[in-house]
Image: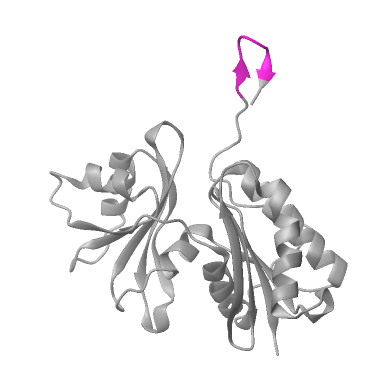
Amino acid sequence: MTALLAIETATDVCSVAIFHGGRVVVELGVDRPRLHAERLVPMIGEAMTVAGLVPTDLAAVAVSAGPGSYTGLRIGASTAKGLAFAFSIPLVAVPSLQALASSVPSAPGSIVMPAFAARRGEVYAAAFRIGRGGMPEEVLSPTAGDGHAVLDAFVRAGPPSGGPVLLVGNGAPVLAAAARGRGLACTIRETSLPGAAAVARLGIALLAAGASVDAATFEPYYLREFTARTLPQHGLVS
């Protein structure tokens, strides 16, 4: 049976999951910033042990591909690429916001807008229509900005009218505040961040559709360029 390892490091959540025998059999994670480099590899080993698998049992590795934290995405991508090379298995790049949208049960036809909180009160966000079988279909491609800019882009995308837009993720309150007074019905469904289980489920569907990527050339989708800040007191870069 297909065993897939999933890695989620796009946000402060660092987690891994194993999909095996048609279901997610284990998910481990920690919700603290700046622990990805320290915890990711040990968690992978622990998850494999709990699942009763060895690395050669893996048929593929799926990784949350962004947008999100620059450092977190780099750590997840480099680890996933290393495993794909080491064991000659496919690498599946799972859009991070699509994974978040898929993690919240929603009726077919619903519009879900997942959002990650970013710096300076901005968010990374996208919008999806939930298709039959629960697969999120993109309505608004990933975008970054304040709540008003994101909602302007959403309205320009011309999504179908109907029920309220379901906001999910820790950026949902930013979008909800921006929606007030705009005549756009929005409801916060969930403010948690995605775990690797959502990446695993979406990853296995993408794998079945033949949507693996070239591990040699794959790069996460940062959406914005990384910028270093110099701390004036000490001349340090953060």
Which is more toward the observer, 45 or 93? Answer: 45
- The residue sitting at 54% across, 61% down in the picture is 95
Q: Nearer the viewer, residue 90 or 173?
A: 173
Is 232 covered by the magenta stretch? yes
Residue 64 visible to an observer of this rendering: no
The quarter of the rendered structure image containing the C terminus is: top right
Q: State whether residue 2 is above or below residue 166.
A: below
Measuring from the top left, give residue 131's x and y in whole percent: 37, 78
Residue at 70% across / 55% down in the picture? 40
Q: Which residues are magenta?
A: 229-236
Please state the total of marks drawn on the protein image.
0
Q: Which quadrant of the figure contains the N terminus?
A: bottom right
Q: Give the left or right position of residue 93, taking residue 170 as reference.
A: right
64 in relation to 119, above or below: below
Between 121 and 143, the residue placed more toward the observer is: 121
Magenta stretch: helix, strand or loop mostly: loop
- Residue 122 is left or right of residue 194, and the answer is left
Residue beneath the point at 61% across and 60% down: 15
Q: Quadrant of residue 148?
A: top left
Residue 159 is a magenta residue: no
Image spot of residue 161 (x, y percent): 19, 66
Write the residue at 76% across / 77% down: 58
Q: Position of residue 73 (x, y in %)?
A: 63, 49
Vertical comparison of 232 with 218: above or below: above
Residue 70 in sight? yes
